[in-house]
Image: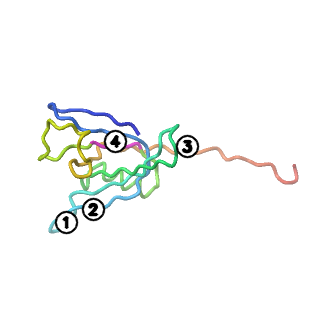
Amino acid sequence: MKSWLESTDGVNYLVRAGEGRITAVEPIGIPDLDDAFALHRVEIDCVSPRGFARSIRFTARAQVSAGSFLHGAAVAALENGESVNWEIQWHRHSWVPGHVSIVDLDLDTDATAQLVALERIPSQVAEPVEFPSRESL
């Protein structure tokens, strides 16, 4: 996973990107009169970068608008068990002053994670391997 800071109008936000598998797409908030939810939470089980200990696990969670392209892509990746490249941005809540750096905030309470990119990773289908028969050994 890669992390970096970006800023808009002098206010910084955190960006993280990596590879993983979608493990859940769940509605959040209160449904409207038609029992539809405006937002869903996408949960991603992240793959450790090469060279990092496999025992370190990170699960990313981010919001996505219902019915958006990203929502549809997340649902499809969940159903198909596909690996994805993802990018999430953490933006401070409106009541958090802009002069406070995003790195000084508690991301769970002071910011909202927004899924901004999701791309399917084509599976590497290997050629079938033929093993010698017992008779030829």
Residue drawn at the location 23% of the way across and 44% of the way down: 105
126 left or right of 67?
right
Residue drawn at the location 46% of the way across and 55% of the way down: 81
Would you name the residue on which mark 4 appears?
Answer: 87
Mark 4 or 3: in front is 4
Would you name the residue on which mark 3 appears?
Answer: 124
Question: Whole-Å distance between the Cαs marked 1 and 3?
Answer: 40 Å
124 left or right of 66?
right
Q: What amino acid type is highlighted by mark number 3?
A: Gln
**Looking at the image, which residue sits at the far front?**
104
Report x, y in % for residue 67: 26, 55
Residue 89: numbered disc: none
Q: What amino acid type is highlighted by mark number 2?
A: Pro
Q: Main secondary structure of the magenta part?
A: strand
* Vertical arrangement, residue 66 with respect to residue 86, above or below: below
Quadrant containing the N terminus in the rendered view: top left
Report x, y in % for residue 13: 23, 38
Report x, y in % for residue 86: 37, 43
Would you name the residue on which mark 2 appears?
Answer: 27
Q: Earlier in the sequence, mark 2 or mark 3?
A: 2
Q: Earlier in the sequence, mark 1 or mark 3?
A: 1
94 left or right of 76?
left
Residue 31: numbered disc: 1
